[in-house]
Image (cartoon, rainbow, N blue to C red):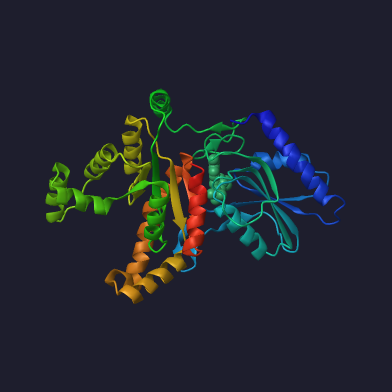
Amino acid sequence: MITYEQIEKAIDGVAERMNRDFEGCTDVPVLLCILNGSILFTAELMKRLDFNVELVSMKLSSYVGTSSTGKIRQVMGMTGDIKGKRVIIVEDIVDTGNTIVDLDRIVREKGATQVKICTMLLKPAVYNKPLKLDYVGMEIPNDFIVGFGLDYDEVGRNLKDIYVLDPDPDYHVVQQADNTQNASHMKYYILFGPPGAGKGTQATAMVEKYNLRHISTGALLREEIAAGTELGLKAKALIDAGALVPDEVVEGMIENLFAKVKDVDGFLLDGFPRTIAQAEALDSILAKKGEKVTSVVSIMIPDDMIKERIRHRAAIEGRADDASEDTINNRIKTYHDKTEPLIDFYKKAGKYAEIEGTGTIEQVRESIFTLMDKF
Ligand code: IMP
Ligand code: MG
């Protein structure tokens, strides 16, 4: 995707701008290398700087637990003191921006007097945080990439050039073959979001604006049962026996619906896939049709806001499952445990986009529309 020469040129540009901004400085700003990804970038950048810098490295743990204050990431060692100093955070890549927002906060909390953010790469299609990025080497599309320090499960950091990860090469061959015969593709969106994020409200607006069929697996089961289809009968027998409906049944229903519904421009999947196995099944159902997932739309709110909103809803609607603190905590935990692996799965497929769900209904809707307009 990007050759070593192009990367070098991008780094030249960043260094030039940084040298200009820090020209004649009398302090020794900290260059904060975020391990492991930005090792190569930091080294290349540092060689090009004309002013004195102090190199400090740090690593963030991945998200740990879920507390009342939401998801927390911890510093796993910072190799020097940054208190009272100006800090330039050096990142490999900014995707959703969650990491850089956490980093900015942590560095300020540790007493930095000024924070500048520098990233080798940026995915503008998915970055939607208000935080200003001071130095950006290069903007890239929403693909999952490896090389020049960036990894796929720790592998690939040594590659000199940057490559797009191809999760399943055969899949793309099917795609291309079909593209030539069938120019009009359906859109397949997947809606993610914790309880209370406003998924229901936003789904209605999305479906209307983009002429999509909303597929909620729960509602679908009830429909199939009511219509007395073979699948419906199978599902009913299981539900009546108090058993869970297995993956194949849900997948079968979705496949049937994709084949049956014609008068729309696409689908909005809600509540499916719930597991990696289901996500893989969805990929193969779509590959058979020469289609693919368009994008995940993930509406994110912090854990304490989930609680607040559920409590608020409980007060209005008197729902029993909304009322107890334990139940709420359990639902939040289930949500994190189940969806987090899927987020990673779709990030690696270059299909993950996150929307800040903390604003008003209208603000959130506008961010969703801005994202979906790109597709
Ligand atoms: P964010 O928090 O979503 O902005 O993601 C930033 C972090 O995710 C980076 O520091 C990387 O470790 C990782 N990341 C995001 N996109 C990619 C990619 O395309 N390839 C490899 N790692 C990535
Ligand atoms: Mg990284």
Residue found 72% across the figure and 38% down from its top: 11
Task: Tell me the residue at 41%/28% (across/down).
Answer: 175
User: Would you place residue 33 above or below residue 311 in this image?
Assistant: above
Residue 65 position, x and y percent, is: 45, 60
Name which quarter of the figure residue 102 lies in: bottom right
Q: Is residue 105 above or below residue 270?
A: below
The tally of labels here is 0
Q: Quadrant of residue 132?
A: bottom right
Q: Position of residue 133 (x, y in %)?
A: 67, 51
Residue in the foreground of this view, choosing between 222 and 173:
222
Tell me what residue is drawn at x 59 percent, y 57 percent. Answer: 101
Q: Which quarter of the figure is the N terminus placed in?
A: top right
- Closer-to-camera residue (130/164): 130
Nearer to the camera, 267 or 148 = 267
Q: Left or right: 191 with respect to 45?
A: left
Q: Nearer the viewer, residue 1 or 91?
A: 1
Q: Is residue 334 left or right of residue 20?
A: left
Q: Is residue 309 above or below residue 207?
A: below
Q: Quadrant of ligand 1?
A: top right
Q: Is residue 278 visible?
A: yes
Q: Position of residue 335 (x, y in %)?
A: 37, 57
Q: Position of residue 193 (x, y in %)?
A: 41, 56
